[in-house]
Every structure is written in C-alpha cells, then in structure tokens.
Image (tube, rainbow, N blue to C red):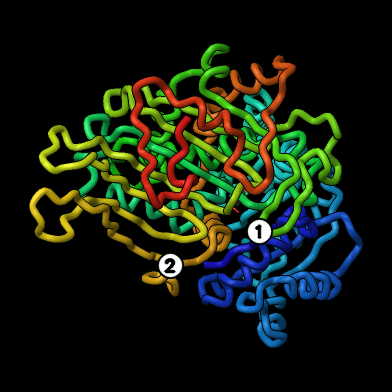
C-alpha cells in the first residue's frame, strides 16, 4: 500500500515533539508501509534538505532509546519532504496537488492523509481549500487534532466546515488517549473475557473512579491553557472517552460504528448538570506554589502568559451518573488536575461488599484497579485467609498483572498507533462528530455556571491531591472505600 501523509503545522510543537518521533518509531519498527512519503507543510521558506536538518536537530531531544542514529535518520529522512504554503492561498493548494501527483505511479498514492496539526481556527479554511482544489476524493482522509472547538457551538461550526468537504468516514478526530495500549486494553478486558461482564453492573458495583492526575504544571502553554482549563482540556475528551469505554454496552462487533454507537449512548445517558448539581457535584481548583518532586514550583498565577487574576481551573473533580438500567444509582467520579502529587492515571472499580459477613472484622469490598499510566496493568484486590487460626480476620491480597513487563516489545506509543490507524483507514480509535458534540453538550452547563460564578476555583498547593473540598463532597450514606495502603489517587471520594 502506498500513502502520502501531509502534516499541516509541519514546524509546530506537535509535529516535532509527537508526530515525527512517532513516525520515526513506526518506520524503525518496520510498520510504516514501504511506499510512503511524509510532507511537512508550513509558512517558512525552506527546502527538503533544510527541513530535514531542522528536524534532525529537534529529534535529538528524544530520550536516548528513541533517538535516531545518524544512519537511521538518513534513511528515514528520505521519506520526509517540505512544502511552503500559505494556507489561505488557492495557488499553494495547486502546488500541493502537483506534489501529490508527482509520484512515479500514475494516479497518486493509494491513501492520502491530511493531518491538521494547526490551530483549530485554521481547520475550516484548510478543509474549504482542500475541497476547492479537489483534494477531498475517496482516498483522502483528514485528521483533526484536539482541541476541537471551545464549546458546543464552535465544535459544531468546525464539524459543519469539515462535513461540507469530507464525509464522516473521512474525518478522523484525535483523542490520543484512545491510542494508548492501556486504554485499548479496556475493550479487551471487558469484551474479550466472560469473567467480568456479569458483575459489570449496578447490582455488583458500588462506584467507579476515573483519575487522570498529572504532576506537571502548564509549562510554556500558559496562553493556550488559560483559554482552555482542565474541563475542556481533559474532561470533555479524555476522561469522558474512558467513562464511555467503562460504561458502554457490549458492541455487536469490533466495527468502528458499532463501538461508537454504544459510546454515544453512554454520553447521552449521562445525567445532565443543573445549576444546583454543578454547585454540589463539581469542584474546580487552581494550584498555588508548592513542592513537586522535592522542588519548589510556582503557582498557576505565576506561570508564563497567565493573567495574575485568572479564574482558569487546573483541577476538576466531579460526580455523575449514567442513567440507564445497567448503571442507575452508581456514582462515577472523574478527577483530573495538574501539579498533583504524582502522574497517575487509573480507573478503580469498587465492588459492593459481601451481602452477609461470616468472618470476623469489617469486610473490605473487592476492587479492580485498572492502571493506565505510568504503569500499565491490572490489580484485583481480594480477601484471603492467611493462617488457619479460628476467628482470624481475612487479609487483603492483590492479584497483580503487569502488562508493561508482559507485552513491552509489542506495545507502541499512542501517536504511533494512531498514525498507523489513520494511514490504514481504520476508524475505531477516532471520535465521531456526534460523540464529540454530545460530550460538549454535557459539559456546557458547568462552563456556563462557572462563567457566572465570581468565586472562582479553590486553591490547592502544588504537590497535593487537589482542593480539600474535593474530598468533602462525599454523599450521605455512601460508604468510603479507602483502605490502608491505597494511595489517595486510587480512591477520591467526593
Ligand atoms: C493533552 C492535554 O490532551 O493531554 C495536556 O492538552 C495534557 O494538557 C495531556 O498534559 C496529557 O496526556 P498524557 O498522555 O501525558 O496523559
């Protein structure tokens, strides 16, 4: 199979930090189809050689195992080309068309992937110009990088502009969490095993916690982040995608639309927020200066390009429910934040306690901890009898699976996987427009409530697990499942 991959935003951060390293790894792993060309597009005046040198220098920043040797880079770089384009100029798209037609094989590549790694405000103009130049035929796919809009209306406007030129099956919306092997493994866990499905429901599950904690701050992205905030940056997309994978009904097949239909049903079943429930069930926070990894770090308001009076949230914790027969009454807790104690993404499924206790001492409910990162694994927490003494209390034990160790050599990074899927035209790991719009619809009341709330986010010290209010929201009557030896990240109780 032959392909041409066009990277709009060819000199941007995303391209050299994520996309090019991922393409290099795919090439190194022998996964990139042999007859493939990569075209970086940007405004600067350069030629192929100039771009290749520029990229070579950038790739030196990669960790040593991922850095290309000079010999490897020379071979990889033969596939990399550069085209200067002003994205508003039809003549420049004519040049792009000529480049795509310049292959020795007549008719061009089997697949052309237009990857829009630019600011989203450029998506409509790029799509319009691609359409006007006839670069939207069946073989062409367009990949849209996050953030896709700022709210429902802007997301719909982008989708309309894309939809005027490309069909839904040609438009691939990225959520890089879907490319993570640990996230893909959620599907295998739920639908490749018969074991969990009978228990995966309100009768057996007390509550589910999804935590995406980061120890880093906003770094140099203060400008972007301050217009975005944690709800738009992490909850509307990554956290909700995880929730859909945990809560969805078994799809009838592994076909992309069979899966996306089920995910959409979950999003539609999420309990809508009201003014009252936002106040009760959602906590927003903003980090202050503190200690992270043993070093003092500045507060959010001291970060570069952040206004000193910003109300932007760097932390969100919320409680929601999926209103259907499977999940009615089961709280789903989502929590994400920057500058927390550790980088730690995991989903904790808390089972109900045994209905009748025959052993001495308090019963400890079973828990399934699905570790997404930095570790990739599964922990099933059970109770066992340690000795044979009569009247002995049961002891917590853990079945521990380490997928990093077991499958390390077969696992590839999220962007490597997503780029290969885009080239192959498999849509499973991309978000459909109706899913994306429904996620916006659900978060909008929170955004509106916050916009009208003069109080702003609650402060928390960098290096902690977020504002104390996030743990003070525990609903009446819901048992706390925190147990000894469990890190706070494993179980946030609102
Ligand atoms: C991105 C957000 O989508 O995800 C970033 O814009 C965040 O703010 C990042 O840091 C987290 O991704 P990962 O893969 O490091 O968990």
Q: Residue shown at 68%/73% (left/top)?
A: 79
| Location of residue 287 (image quadrant) | top right
Q: Is residue 36 above or below residue 271?
A: below
How far apart in space, not on screen, are marks 1 and 2 (Cα)?
24 Å
Q: Is residue 418 left or right of residue 105?
A: left
Of residues 264 and 158, the one nearer the viewer is 264
What residue does disc 2 label? 404
| Location of residue 332 (image quadrant) | top left
The local secondary structure at tag 2 comes to helix
Q: Position of residue 234 (x, y in %)?
A: 59, 40
The verdict on label 2 being within 8 Å of ligand 1 is no
| Location of residue 52 (image quadrant) | bottom right
User: Mark 1 or 2, which is nearer the eye?
Assistant: 1
Q: Is residue 23 above or below residue 396?
A: below
Residues marked 1 and 2 touching at CB (< 8 Å): no
Q: Is residue 490 left or right of residue 170?
A: left
The local secondary structure at tag 1 comes to loop
Q: Earlier in the sequence, mark 1 or mark 2?
A: 1
- Please tell me how many numbered marks the rendered image carries: 2
What residue does disc 1 label? 293
Q: Position of residue 437 (x, y in %)?
A: 56, 28
Disc number for residue 211: none
Of residues 294 and 139, the one nearer the viewer is 294
Q: Is residue 187 left or right of residue 1?
A: left
Of residues 107 and 215, the one nearer the viewer is 215
Q: Position of residue 112 (x, y in %)?
A: 61, 57
Q: Position of residue 423 (x, y in %)?
A: 55, 59
Label 2 crowd bin: few (<14), some (14–19), many (20+), radius 10 Å: some
Q: Is residue 48 above or below residue 267?
A: below
Label 1 crowd bin: few (<14), some (14–19), many (20+), radius 10 Å: few
Q: Residue shown at 82%/75% (left/top)?
A: 53
């Amino acid at each position: 199979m032959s392909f041409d991959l066009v990277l709009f935003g060819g000199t941007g951060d995303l391209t050299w930090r994520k996309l090019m390293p991922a393409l290099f790894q795919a090439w190194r792993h022998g996964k990139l189809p042999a007859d493939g060309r990569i075209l970086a597009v940007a405004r600067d005046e350069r030629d192929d050689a100039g771009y290749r040198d520029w990229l070579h220098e950038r790739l030196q920043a990669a960790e040593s195992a991922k850095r290309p040797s000079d010999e490897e880079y020379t071979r990889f770089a033969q596939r990399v080309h550069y085209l200067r384009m002003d994205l508003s100029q039809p003549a420049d798209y004519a040049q792009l068309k000529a480049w795509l037609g310049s292959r020795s094989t007549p008719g061009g590549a089997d697949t052309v992937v237009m990857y829009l790694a630019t600011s989203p405000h450029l998506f409509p103009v790029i799509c319009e110009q691609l359409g006007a130049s006839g670069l939207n035929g069946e073989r062409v796919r367009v990949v849209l990088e996050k953030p896709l809009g700022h709210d429902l209306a802007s997301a719909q406007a982008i989708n309309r502009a894309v939809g005027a030129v490309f069909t839904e099956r040609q438009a691939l919306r990225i959520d890089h969490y879907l490319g993570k092997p640990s996230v893909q493994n959620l599907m295998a866990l739920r639908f490749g095993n018969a074991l969990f499905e009978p228990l995966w429901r309100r009768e057996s599950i007390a509550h589910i916690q999804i935590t995406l904690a980061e120890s880093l701050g906003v770094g140099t992205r203060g400008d972007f982040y301050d217009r975005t905030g944690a709800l738009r940056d992490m909850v509307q997309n990554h956290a909700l995608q995880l929730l859909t994978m945990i809560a969805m009904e078994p799809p009838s097949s592994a076909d992309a639309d069979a899966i996306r239909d089920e995910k959409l049903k979950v999003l539609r079943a999420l309990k809508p927020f009201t003014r009252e429930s936002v106040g009760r069930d959602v906590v927003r926070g903003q980090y202050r200066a503190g200690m992270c990894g043993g070093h003092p770090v500045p507060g959010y308001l001291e970060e570069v390009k952040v206004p000193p009076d910003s109300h932007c949230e760097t932390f969100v914790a919320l409680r929601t429910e999926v209103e259907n027969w499977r999940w009615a009454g089961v709280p789903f807790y989502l929590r994400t934040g920057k500058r927390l104690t550790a980088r730690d993404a995991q989903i904790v499924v808390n089972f109900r306690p045994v209905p009748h206790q025959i052993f001495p001492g308090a019963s400890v409910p079973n828990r399934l901890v699905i570790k997404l990162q930095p570790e990739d694994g599964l922990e099933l927490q059970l109770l066992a009898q340690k000795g044979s003494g009569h009247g002995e209390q049961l002891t917590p034990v853990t079945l521990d699976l380490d997928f990093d160790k077991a499958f390390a050599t077969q696992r590839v990074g999220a962007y490597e996987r997503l780029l290969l899927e885009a080239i192959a035209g498999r849509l499973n790991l991309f978000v459909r427009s109706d899913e994306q719009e429904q996620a916006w619809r659900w978060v909008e009341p929170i955004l509106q409530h916050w916009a009208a709330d003069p109080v702003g986010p609650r402060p928390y010290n960098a290096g902690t697990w977020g504002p104390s209010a996030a743990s003070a929201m525990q609903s009446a009557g819901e048992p706390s499942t925190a147990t000894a030896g469990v890190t706070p990240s494993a179980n946030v109780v609102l």
